[in-house]
Amino acid sequence: MSVSAAQEIGPDKTLLLVDDDEPFLKRLAKAMEKRGFSVETAGSVAAGRAIATARPPAYAVIDLRLEDGNGLDVVEVLRNRRPDSRIVVLTGYGAIATAVAAVKIGATDYLSKPADATDITNALLATGDDLPPPPENPMSADRVRWEHIQRVYELCDRNVSETARRLNMHRRTLQRILAKRSPK
């Protein structure tokens, strides 16, 4: 990233990353450090809330669904402790309802995974009413379908029969879809 972009970060370069996907968290932390941020990471809602309370950062990237709860809890604590912080919520389950909830509770932007460091940086540094440019590699229709099926499957506590009923699809068809890798 160029020097001018690094100057846009501002004097307070603190960034909190909260995600329970450890390999992704480490890669993103390295990429954001290279872009000039001072990164602190957390792998759970509890750890994210503790950091947001003790040392509220200027920027935050928070995963919506974590093993121990909802990332919006961290957003809420951070918004209360530091109202000027810029927060981007990430999720593998892109849905309009959760995007609206994230923005209402105080998130600056909402990105669907897989989001790369450039997309995240653009979202964090977008000012005023400027929207960040659209992603260079948006999810394919097959990937969006797969993400939706995975979300419903998780909401049904991984019950194949109930998921198939809710999606109005044959159980065997659903089993074949779940057995495959995610499309790109």
Image: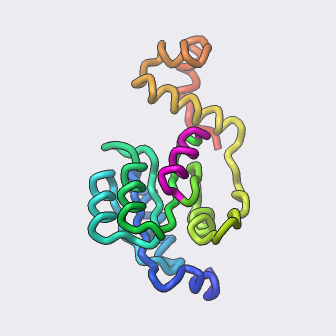
Magenta span: 95-107
**Pick the front one: 166 or 22:** 166
Q: Identify the residue at horizontal 57%, vertical 53% (top origin).
A: 110
Is residue 132 found left or right of 62 in the rendered image? right
Q: Quadrant of residue 41?
A: bottom left
Indicate the position of residue 106 as horizontal and vertical percent values: 49, 56
Indicate the position of residue 113 as horizontal and vertical percent values: 56, 50
Q: Report if residue 106 lies within the magenta region.
A: yes
In which quadrant is the C terminus drawn?
A: top right
**Magenta stretch mostly in which secondary structure?**
helix
Indicate the position of residue 72 as horizontal and vertical percent values: 42, 49
Q: Report if residue 133 lies within the magenta region.
A: no
Q: Identify the residue at horizontal 69%, vertical 57% (top origin).
A: 135
Is residue 92 found left or right of 3 in the rendered image? left
In which quadrant is the N terminus drawn?
A: bottom right
Taking 14 as reference, is 11 above or below it? below
**Pick the front one: 79 or 175:** 79
**Pick the front one: 183 or 50:** 50
